[in-house]
Image: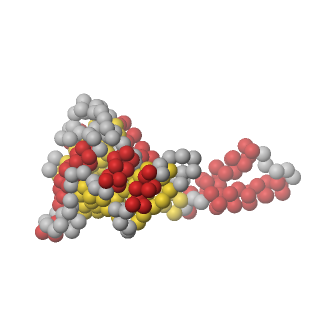
Amino acid sequence: MFKNLLIFRIASSWSADLAQASDALEAHPFTPCTPTQERALGWVPPRGQANGAMVESINGQWILRHVTETKILPSSVVDSHVAEKSEQMEAQTGRKPGRKELRDLKDEARLSLLPMAFTKRQGTWVWIDAKQGLLVIDASSPQKADEILTALVEQLPGFIPKIVQTQESPATAMAAWLEDQSAPGAFSIGDECELKAADDTKASVRYARHSLEIDEIRGHLQAGKRPTRLSLGWGERCQFVLTDTLQVKKLSFSDAVHEDKDKSDDHFDADVAITTGELSQLIPQLIEALGGEEQTL
């Protein structure tokens, strides 16, 4: 269900009311792009059922799904259309179109081409742990989560999320773990990492499917390179890549975690219960391994 984790702390002043939250999001449903609309976004029932609730609560854990749809219109196609119209205008008037006319031609070209453009639709899982005051978004970068954060803040009164900051930076912690060739607690070092120089050269070295318990890694650290990515295991439960900005990527759970899922009649409920149950333990332990939170709201 979740492959990436962006972790936010929700202000303690927010009053979590499931019915109110669901009603608020139902006022902003996803509707596909109209023929001349470039982008559309909104919420869909996470269970995938028509007219279903916009917020599903499984064992007290809230699951939401946000969808964006974008028309794919290559700039080269627009430019070709503008060039053709520009040549026609020049042939009719005897002069080349000015900047404003070119802008108008470009706007007209986009408007006429949009109905024929392909669309790309992307759904994003959102998890709210009201008890722990956590918001987790399955996005690969903060930029991709911005629209979701904006929607939540605007649509849920008093909802104020702030990216989690830890006492020790992930880069510093990961460097120490690689130096010691050991990670704390239930964590273990995997077989993937990226080290990058902090100077103007930005020199980098990457290891994939490679043992990281080698002196070569220490040499790069001593030369001033710092980890930007490091794969980690968490007991026998999951594997993931931690970044220097406290993002979790490439999250995958072991077969042991899902061994009982097929016994459930409701796969959605089982997926949510298993995923949130595991992450409810993983996230606090990861924060603790990085020295705890720097501050809370």
Q: How is the image coloured?
A: secondary structure
Please say if 146 is above or below 179: above
Q: How many marks?
A: 0
Q: Nearer the viewer, residue 122 or 96?
A: 122
**Where residue 36 sits in the image (x, y, percent)?**
54, 53
Please state which of residues 58 and 215 is positioned toward the viewer in this rendering: 215
Question: In the figure, is residue 276 to the left or right of 72?
Answer: left
Does the rendering let one see residue 26? no
Q: Nearer the viewer, residue 70 or 109?
A: 70
In the picture as drawn, the residue positioned furthest to the right comes out as 94
Residue 273 image point, x, y percent: 18, 56
Left or right side of 101 for 194: left
User: Quarter holding the C terminus?
Assistant: top left
Residue name at image x 69 percent, y 61 percent: 80
Point 24% across, 30% down: residue: 13
Q: Nearer the viewer, residue 247 or 93?
A: 247
Residue 165 is at least partly visible in this image:
yes
Quarter that holds the N terminus:
bottom left
Image quadrant in which you'd find residue 188: bottom left
Q: Position of residue 165 (x, y in %)?
A: 34, 39
When the figure is inspected, residue 115 is found, relative to residue 16, above or below; the finding is below
Answer left or right for 100 relative to 50.
right
Query: Looking at the image, which residue is at 42% across and 61% down?
Result: 216
Percent of width and height locating residue 232: 30, 58
Q: Quadrant of residue 167?
A: top left
